[in-house]
Amino acid sequence: MDFKQALKERANYIEDLLKKYMPKEEGYQKTIMEAMNYSLEAGGKRLRPILTLEACKVVGGNEEDVIAFAVAIEMIHTYSLIHDDLPALDNDDLRRGRPTNHKVYGESMAILAGDALLNYAFEVMLSNSINKEDSNKYLCAINEIAKSSGIYGMIGGQVVDVQSENVQISKDKLDFIHLNKTAAIIIGCMRAGAIIGGANDEQLEEITKYAKNIGLSFQIVDDILDIVGDEAKLGKKVGSDIENHKSTYPSLLGLDKSKEIARSLIDEAKLSISKLSEETELLDGLADYIIAREY
Protein backbone atom coordinates (compact mmCIF):
# COMPACT_ATOMS: atom_id res chain seq x y z
CA MET A 1 0.00 0.00 0.00
CA ASP A 2 1.38 3.44 -0.90
CA PHE A 3 1.67 6.24 1.62
CA LYS A 4 -1.25 8.32 0.34
CA GLN A 5 -3.62 5.37 0.60
CA ALA A 6 -2.31 4.45 4.05
CA LEU A 7 -2.73 8.05 5.24
CA LYS A 8 -6.26 8.20 3.84
CA GLU A 9 -7.20 5.00 5.64
CA ARG A 10 -5.78 6.29 8.90
CA ALA A 11 -7.63 9.60 8.51
CA ASN A 12 -10.88 7.74 7.80
CA TYR A 13 -10.28 5.65 10.91
CA ILE A 14 -9.93 8.83 12.96
CA GLU A 15 -13.16 10.17 11.45
CA ASP A 16 -14.99 7.03 12.58
CA LEU A 17 -13.54 7.35 16.08
CA LEU A 18 -14.53 11.01 16.34
CA LYS A 19 -18.13 10.17 15.46
CA LYS A 20 -18.26 7.71 18.36
CA TYR A 21 -17.02 10.30 20.83
CA MET A 22 -18.87 13.40 19.60
CA PRO A 23 -21.45 14.70 22.09
CA LYS A 24 -25.08 14.08 21.25
CA GLU A 25 -26.92 17.19 20.10
CA GLU A 26 -29.70 17.19 22.70
CA GLY A 27 -30.97 19.01 25.76
CA TYR A 28 -31.49 22.70 26.39
CA GLN A 29 -27.79 23.28 25.67
CA LYS A 30 -27.80 21.38 22.36
CA THR A 31 -26.61 24.46 20.43
CA ILE A 32 -23.19 24.13 22.03
CA MET A 33 -22.97 20.49 20.92
CA GLU A 34 -23.97 21.52 17.40
CA ALA A 35 -21.24 24.19 17.35
CA MET A 36 -18.63 21.75 18.70
CA ASN A 37 -19.54 19.10 16.14
CA TYR A 38 -19.69 21.61 13.28
CA SER A 39 -15.99 22.28 13.62
CA LEU A 40 -15.05 18.69 14.48
CA GLU A 41 -16.81 17.47 11.34
CA ALA A 42 -15.08 20.01 9.09
CA GLY A 43 -12.41 17.49 8.11
CA GLY A 44 -8.74 18.26 8.03
CA LYS A 45 -5.57 16.23 7.90
CA ARG A 46 -6.07 14.58 11.33
CA LEU A 47 -2.28 14.48 11.69
CA ARG A 48 -2.19 14.88 15.47
CA PRO A 49 -4.41 11.89 16.30
CA ILE A 50 -2.60 9.80 13.69
CA LEU A 51 0.74 10.75 15.26
CA THR A 52 -0.63 9.83 18.70
CA LEU A 53 -1.53 6.34 17.50
CA GLU A 54 1.73 5.88 15.60
CA ALA A 55 3.85 6.96 18.58
CA CYS A 56 2.21 4.26 20.66
CA LYS A 57 2.74 1.62 17.97
CA VAL A 58 6.34 2.46 17.11
CA VAL A 59 7.47 1.78 20.70
CA GLY A 60 5.65 -1.55 20.76
CA GLY A 61 2.36 -0.49 22.35
CA ASN A 62 -1.25 -1.34 21.48
CA GLU A 63 -2.94 1.56 19.72
CA GLU A 64 -6.31 0.55 21.19
CA ASP A 65 -4.99 1.83 24.53
CA VAL A 66 -4.52 5.36 23.18
CA ILE A 67 -7.66 5.86 21.08
CA ALA A 68 -9.31 8.22 23.58
CA PHE A 69 -6.16 10.36 23.58
CA ALA A 70 -6.08 10.49 19.79
CA VAL A 71 -9.68 11.71 19.74
CA ALA A 72 -9.04 14.20 22.55
CA ILE A 73 -6.04 15.75 20.83
CA GLU A 74 -8.15 16.49 17.76
CA MET A 75 -10.73 18.15 20.01
CA ILE A 76 -8.02 20.32 21.56
CA HIS A 77 -6.64 21.19 18.13
CA THR A 78 -10.14 22.06 16.90
CA TYR A 79 -10.83 24.28 19.90
CA SER A 80 -7.61 26.19 19.16
CA LEU A 81 -8.69 26.73 15.55
CA ILE A 82 -12.10 28.04 16.59
CA HIS A 83 -10.47 30.58 18.89
CA ASP A 84 -7.72 31.44 16.38
CA ASP A 85 -10.35 32.37 13.79
CA LEU A 86 -12.16 34.83 16.06
CA PRO A 87 -12.08 38.56 15.20
CA ALA A 88 -9.98 39.24 18.30
CA LEU A 89 -7.22 36.98 16.95
CA ASP A 90 -6.81 36.07 13.25
CA ASN A 91 -10.29 37.25 12.17
CA ASP A 92 -10.71 34.55 9.49
CA ASP A 93 -13.97 33.84 7.69
CA LEU A 94 -13.02 30.46 6.21
CA ARG A 95 -11.62 27.29 7.73
CA ARG A 96 -11.23 24.06 5.76
CA GLY A 97 -13.36 25.51 2.99
CA ARG A 98 -16.31 26.33 5.23
CA PRO A 99 -17.43 29.42 7.14
CA THR A 100 -15.63 29.62 10.46
CA ASN A 101 -17.49 28.74 13.64
CA HIS A 102 -18.19 32.31 14.71
CA LYS A 103 -19.58 33.12 11.25
CA VAL A 104 -22.18 30.37 11.70
CA TYR A 105 -22.93 30.45 15.45
CA GLY A 106 -21.78 33.93 16.46
CA GLU A 107 -18.75 34.98 18.49
CA SER A 108 -20.19 34.16 21.91
CA MET A 109 -21.13 30.61 20.95
CA ALA A 110 -17.80 30.09 19.16
CA ILE A 111 -15.92 31.05 22.33
CA LEU A 112 -18.05 28.64 24.34
CA ALA A 113 -17.64 25.89 21.71
CA GLY A 114 -13.88 26.18 21.98
CA ASP A 115 -14.03 26.14 25.77
CA ALA A 116 -16.36 23.13 25.66
CA LEU A 117 -14.10 21.14 23.31
CA LEU A 118 -11.10 21.70 25.57
CA ASN A 119 -13.01 20.56 28.65
CA TYR A 120 -14.62 17.65 26.84
CA ALA A 121 -11.21 16.47 25.62
CA PHE A 122 -10.00 16.09 29.20
CA GLU A 123 -13.27 14.41 30.17
CA VAL A 124 -12.71 11.86 27.39
CA MET A 125 -9.10 11.19 28.44
CA LEU A 126 -9.86 10.94 32.15
CA SER A 127 -12.92 8.74 31.76
CA ASN A 128 -10.78 6.31 29.79
CA SER A 129 -7.92 6.37 32.31
CA ILE A 130 -9.24 6.28 35.88
CA ASN A 131 -10.08 2.57 35.97
CA LYS A 132 -6.90 1.32 34.31
CA GLU A 133 -4.62 -0.97 36.34
CA ASP A 134 -1.63 1.09 35.23
CA SER A 135 -3.46 4.40 35.56
CA ASN A 136 -0.27 6.29 36.49
CA LYS A 137 1.09 6.19 32.94
CA TYR A 138 -2.27 7.46 31.66
CA LEU A 139 -2.12 10.34 34.13
CA CYS A 140 1.43 11.06 32.96
CA ALA A 141 0.15 11.13 29.38
CA ILE A 142 -2.66 13.54 30.32
CA ASN A 143 -0.08 15.74 32.03
CA GLU A 144 1.98 15.84 28.80
CA ILE A 145 -1.04 17.03 26.84
CA ALA A 146 -2.07 19.54 29.50
CA LYS A 147 1.42 21.11 29.55
CA SER A 148 1.79 21.15 25.77
CA SER A 149 -1.59 22.82 25.22
CA GLY A 150 -1.34 25.33 28.07
CA ILE A 151 0.71 28.35 29.13
CA TYR A 152 3.99 26.46 28.71
CA GLY A 153 2.98 25.30 25.24
CA MET A 154 0.33 26.24 22.70
CA ILE A 155 -1.32 29.06 24.64
CA GLY A 156 2.04 30.51 25.67
CA GLY A 157 3.12 30.54 22.03
CA GLN A 158 -0.14 32.16 20.99
CA VAL A 159 0.35 34.90 23.60
CA VAL A 160 3.77 35.84 22.23
CA ASP A 161 2.42 35.61 18.66
CA VAL A 162 -0.36 38.09 19.45
CA GLN A 163 2.05 40.44 21.20
CA SER A 164 4.42 40.29 18.23
CA GLU A 165 2.01 41.67 15.64
CA ASN A 166 3.20 44.92 14.07
CA VAL A 167 6.58 44.40 15.74
CA GLN A 168 9.87 43.29 14.18
CA ILE A 169 11.00 40.32 16.27
CA SER A 170 14.19 38.27 16.45
CA LYS A 171 14.57 34.77 15.03
CA ASP A 172 14.96 33.52 18.61
CA LYS A 173 11.52 34.85 19.56
CA LEU A 174 10.03 33.51 16.32
CA ASP A 175 11.46 30.08 17.15
CA PHE A 176 9.82 30.33 20.57
CA ILE A 177 6.46 31.06 18.92
CA HIS A 178 6.80 28.17 16.48
CA LEU A 179 8.01 25.73 19.11
CA ASN A 180 5.18 26.52 21.50
CA LYS A 181 2.26 27.53 19.31
CA THR A 182 2.61 24.66 16.83
CA ALA A 183 5.25 22.08 17.75
CA ALA A 184 4.40 21.75 21.46
CA ILE A 185 1.03 20.04 20.95
CA ILE A 186 2.61 17.62 18.45
CA ILE A 187 5.33 16.85 20.98
CA GLY A 188 2.72 16.43 23.71
CA CYS A 189 0.45 14.06 21.78
CA MET A 190 3.35 11.89 20.58
CA ARG A 191 4.92 11.72 24.04
CA ALA A 192 1.49 10.79 25.44
CA GLY A 193 1.08 8.01 22.89
CA ALA A 194 4.60 6.73 23.53
CA ILE A 195 4.18 6.80 27.32
CA ILE A 196 0.98 4.76 27.12
CA GLY A 197 2.77 2.45 24.69
CA GLY A 198 5.41 1.75 27.34
CA ALA A 199 8.33 3.77 25.93
CA ASN A 200 11.60 3.80 27.82
CA ASP A 201 13.62 7.00 28.31
CA GLU A 202 15.69 6.54 25.15
CA GLN A 203 12.62 5.90 22.99
CA LEU A 204 10.84 8.89 24.49
CA GLU A 205 13.82 11.11 23.70
CA GLU A 206 13.80 10.10 20.01
CA ILE A 207 10.02 10.50 19.79
CA THR A 208 10.40 14.00 21.23
CA LYS A 209 13.09 14.93 18.71
CA TYR A 210 10.95 13.65 15.82
CA ALA A 211 7.85 15.51 17.04
CA LYS A 212 9.73 18.76 17.65
CA ASN A 213 11.34 18.75 14.22
CA ILE A 214 8.19 17.93 12.24
CA GLY A 215 6.27 20.48 14.31
CA LEU A 216 8.73 23.25 13.54
CA SER A 217 8.85 22.25 9.88
CA PHE A 218 5.04 22.19 9.75
CA GLN A 219 4.84 25.81 10.89
CA ILE A 220 7.54 26.97 8.49
CA VAL A 221 5.66 25.33 5.62
CA ASP A 222 2.46 27.02 6.86
CA ASP A 223 4.27 30.36 6.69
CA ILE A 224 5.42 29.59 3.15
CA LEU A 225 1.94 28.50 2.03
CA ASP A 226 0.47 31.72 3.39
CA ILE A 227 2.51 33.46 0.69
CA VAL A 228 2.56 31.04 -2.25
CA GLY A 229 -0.31 28.65 -1.43
CA ASP A 230 -3.48 28.05 -3.43
CA GLU A 231 -6.46 29.42 -1.51
CA ALA A 232 -8.77 26.78 -3.01
CA LYS A 233 -6.53 23.96 -1.79
CA LEU A 234 -5.84 25.55 1.58
CA GLY A 235 -9.53 26.15 2.27
CA LYS A 236 -8.72 29.53 3.80
CA LYS A 237 -7.53 32.97 2.82
CA VAL A 238 -3.85 33.39 1.99
CA GLY A 239 -1.82 36.45 2.95
CA SER A 240 -3.21 36.71 6.48
CA ASP A 241 0.27 36.84 8.05
CA ILE A 242 1.18 39.85 5.92
CA GLU A 243 -2.22 41.43 6.54
CA ASN A 244 -1.79 40.99 10.32
CA HIS A 245 1.84 42.20 10.16
CA LYS A 246 3.25 38.98 11.61
CA SER A 247 6.91 38.01 11.48
CA THR A 248 7.47 34.65 9.80
CA TYR A 249 10.40 32.60 8.55
CA PRO A 250 9.92 33.87 4.98
CA SER A 251 9.71 37.49 6.15
CA LEU A 252 12.90 37.15 8.22
CA LEU A 253 14.94 34.74 6.10
CA GLY A 254 13.30 34.60 2.68
CA LEU A 255 11.48 31.74 0.94
CA ASP A 256 14.51 29.77 -0.22
CA LYS A 257 16.22 29.73 3.18
CA SER A 258 12.91 28.85 4.86
CA LYS A 259 12.45 25.87 2.56
CA GLU A 260 16.02 24.75 3.25
CA ILE A 261 15.50 24.86 7.02
CA ALA A 262 12.17 23.03 6.78
CA ARG A 263 13.81 20.25 4.74
CA SER A 264 16.69 19.95 7.21
CA LEU A 265 14.28 19.59 10.12
CA ILE A 266 12.46 16.77 8.31
CA ASP A 267 15.73 14.96 7.66
CA GLU A 268 16.59 15.19 11.36
CA ALA A 269 13.13 13.90 12.30
CA LYS A 270 13.47 10.86 10.05
CA LEU A 271 16.89 10.09 11.54
CA SER A 272 15.42 10.11 15.05
CA ILE A 273 12.53 7.83 14.22
CA SER A 274 14.78 5.36 12.39
CA LYS A 275 16.43 4.57 15.73
CA LEU A 276 13.19 3.20 17.16
CA SER A 277 12.05 0.56 14.71
CA GLU A 278 12.43 -0.81 11.22
CA GLU A 279 8.69 -0.30 10.67
CA THR A 280 8.46 3.46 10.41
CA GLU A 281 7.02 3.80 6.90
CA LEU A 282 4.03 5.88 7.94
CA LEU A 283 6.03 8.18 10.21
CA ASP A 284 8.64 8.62 7.47
CA GLY A 285 5.87 9.33 4.99
CA LEU A 286 4.21 11.83 7.32
CA ALA A 287 7.48 13.71 7.66
CA ASP A 288 7.89 13.91 3.89
CA TYR A 289 4.22 14.85 3.49
CA ILE A 290 4.65 17.81 5.85
CA ILE A 291 7.39 19.30 3.70
CA ALA A 292 5.65 18.58 0.37
CA ARG A 293 2.05 19.46 1.26
CA GLU A 294 0.06 22.10 -0.56
CA TYR A 295 -2.54 22.66 2.17
Image: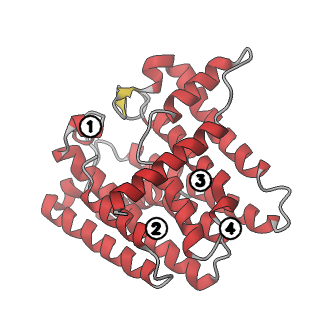
Vertical placement of residue 16 versus 187, above or below: above
Q: Nearer the viewer, residue 255 or 162?
A: 255
Depth check, mark 2 against mark 4: the one in front is 4
Instruction: Name the residue at 69% across, 61% down.
Output: 65
Residue type of the residue flagged with mark 1:
Ser
Instruction: Name the residue at 63% across, 23% down.
Output: 32
Q: Which residue is mark 2?
A: 211
Instruction: Name the residue at 47% across, 25% down.
Output: 101
Q: Is residue 92 visible?
A: no
Q: Which residue is mark 3?
A: 70
Residue type of the residue flagged with mark 4:
Ile
Query: Counting other residues with Cα less than 10 Å from the Cα at mark 2, is it few (<14), some (14-19), or many (20 or more)?
Result: many
Residue type of the residue flagged with mark 3:
Ala
Q: Earlier in the sequence, mark 2 or mark 1?
A: 2
Q: Which residue is mark 4?
A: 196
Query: Counting other residues with Cα less than 10 Å from the Cα at mark 4, is it few (<14), some (14-19), or many (20 or more)?
Result: many
Q: Nearer the viewer, residue 13 or 292?
A: 13
Q: Which residue is mark 1?
A: 240
Q: Secondary structure at mark 1?
A: helix
Query: Counting other residues with Cα less than 10 Å from the Cα at mark 1, is it few (<14), some (14-19), or many (20 or more)?
Result: some
Task: State the quadrant of the N terminus.
Answer: bottom left
Query: Counting other residues with Cα less than 10 Å from the Cα at mark 3, is it few (<14), some (14-19), or many (20 or more)?
Result: many
Residue 267 quadrant: bottom left
Q: Earlier in the sequence, mark 2 or mark 4?
A: 4
Q: Are marks 3 and 4 in contact (CB under 8 Å)?
A: no
